[in-house]
Amino acid sequence: MSKTSPMVWTGRVLTGLFAVFLLTASIFPKLTGMKVAADTLSSLGWKVDYVLMIGLMEFTFIALYLFPPTAVLGAVLMTGLLGGAMATQVRVENPLFSHELFSIYLALFMWGGLWLRDPALRAMLPWRKNEA
């Protein structure tokens, strides 16, 4: 049995933190019909009718992201969803660092976790040192 590197374990931890945060703070409230999910979408100018659909998309994308053969597809789809969330925050002129850029913070966790745990992604997107 081969030993898993600390880099891969760090990637798994980042992936887990991202998934747990999204599941508890966003997906669960939407899929269970919690009032806070409807209130939040409504305050951002979205119709409350979209709560379940957005929750189902988030759940599907996180499931794809957590399953290694479809992890990159899940990350790409989740990135699109996070981009839409960011555009909504910009449109309603919410604060920059706490609201507008929050999707970027989440994406960094998501892609960072995937990059650290997936050698194929690291090969495709290598981290290079400036050799001067």
Image (cartoon, rainbow, N blue to C red):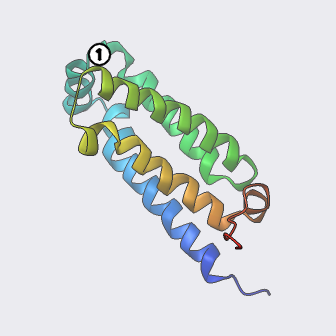
Q: Residue at x 79, y 61 (%)?
A: 123
Residue 105 is left or right of residue 81, and the answer is left
The spot of residue 112 in percent (x, y) is 56, 59
Q: Compared to 2, does 23 lie above or below?
A: above
Quarter of the figure with residue 8? bottom right
Say few, some or many: other residues with alpha carbon within 10 Å of mark 1 (under 14 / 14 to 19 / 20 or more): some
Q: Compared to 122, does 53 lie above or below?
A: above
Residue 16 is left or right of residue 66, and the answer is left
Which quadrant would the C terminus be assigned to in this image?
Answer: bottom right
Residue of label 1: 48
Q: Residue at x 46, y 35 (%)?
A: 82
User: 122 or 117, which is in the foreground?
Assistant: 122
The spot of residue 17 in percent (x, y) is 43, 61
**Which residue of the protein is positioned furthest toward the front in this rendering?**
132
The spot of residue 127 in percent (x, y) is 68, 65
Q: Residue at x 66, y 66 (%)?
A: 117
Q: Amino acid at mark 1?
A: Val
Residue 18 is left or right of residue 65, and the answer is left
Q: Compared to 15, does 64 lie above or below?
A: above
How many labels sit on residues?
1
User: 34 or 22, which is in the foreground?
Assistant: 22
Quarter of the figure with residue 77? top right
Which quadrant would the N terminus be assigned to in this image?
Answer: bottom right
The spot of residue 24 in percent (x, y) is 34, 49
Secondary-structure class at tag 1: helix
Q: Residue at x 56, y 61 (%)?
A: 113
